[in-house]
Amino acid sequence: GAGVSQSPSNKVTEKGKDVELRCDPISGHTALYWYRQSLGQGLEFLIYFQGNSAPDKSGLPSDRFSAERTGGSVSTLTIQRTQQEDSAVYLCASSSTGRAYTFGSGTRLTVV
Amino acid sequence: GDSVTQMEGPVTLSEEACLTINCTYTATGYPSLFWYVQYPGEGLQLLLKATKADDKGSNKGFEATYRKETTSFHLEKGSVQVSDSAVYFCALPQYSGAGSYQLTFGKGTKLSVIP
């Protein structure tokens, strides 16, 4: 597509529920990144996928967070047993050069 | 490790005022430097970049010069408009192995321009 598409744009969930956030990167972009943007924390790197290589998961804050990328395209970020501190905007970005990212509009997650 | 320190704001300016948002960095070597902008309700967009010392990035009337001697990449605009109201992020890429570049961001500076 023309840009990075994320869905849903907003998600409200109850504490303890699992959520799935989706990212559809720009066609042909081999690199895909997830970041989290929360008040007072700025932008935090979560996970990175590059082609068929093993993902760089060094930014995932706990084992409740996981992500996969199917067929080198669409990615899903899953948060299990959500907590209130998980409330944030989750941003996905893709890149063909490894440096110039194109970001999606994000998913605003609210855990109540 | 590499880091970015950015003026946090918020900054409120009248239309046509001059803008400077300070950004300094700590890095090994000479990384590329970026400014991203986030308009209300949207994701981040690349505003401008510089890839080596003394380079000047420019876009939409904004400029930033990569200063190696002061390790700075300050964002400037001579005359801001209401439509420039947004959050601005300074960023630098860090190579983290296996072809992975993570962008390290400053905390963001919220700019509000009033008519």
Image (cartoon, coloured by chain):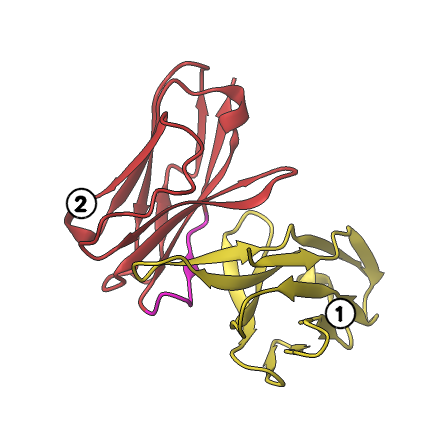
Q: Badge 2 is on which residue?
A: A70
State the hue of chain B.
yellow
Q: Main secondary structure of the magenta part?
A: loop
User: Which chain is represented by red in the image?
Assistant: A
Mark identifier at residue B43: none
**Count of marks overlaid on the render:** 2
Residue B97 image position (x, y, % from top left): 35, 58
Question: B25 and B113: which one is in front?
Answer: B25
Q: Residue at x 32, y 46 (%)?
A: A23
In the rendered image, residue A32 lying in the magenta stretch gets the answer no
Up/down of A58 relative to A97, above or below: above
The 10 Å Cα crowd at callout 1, few under 14, some 14 to 19, many 20 or more, is: many
Q: Which residues are magenta?
A: A97-105
Q: Secondary structure at mark 2?
A: helix
Does residue A33 appear to the left or right of B5 in the view shown?
left
Q: Badge 1 is on which residue?
A: B80
Amino acid at the residue labelled 2: Thr
Query: Label 2 lies in what chain?
Result: A
Up/down of B104 relative to A10, above or below: below
Q: Residue at x 23, y 64 (%)?
A: A28
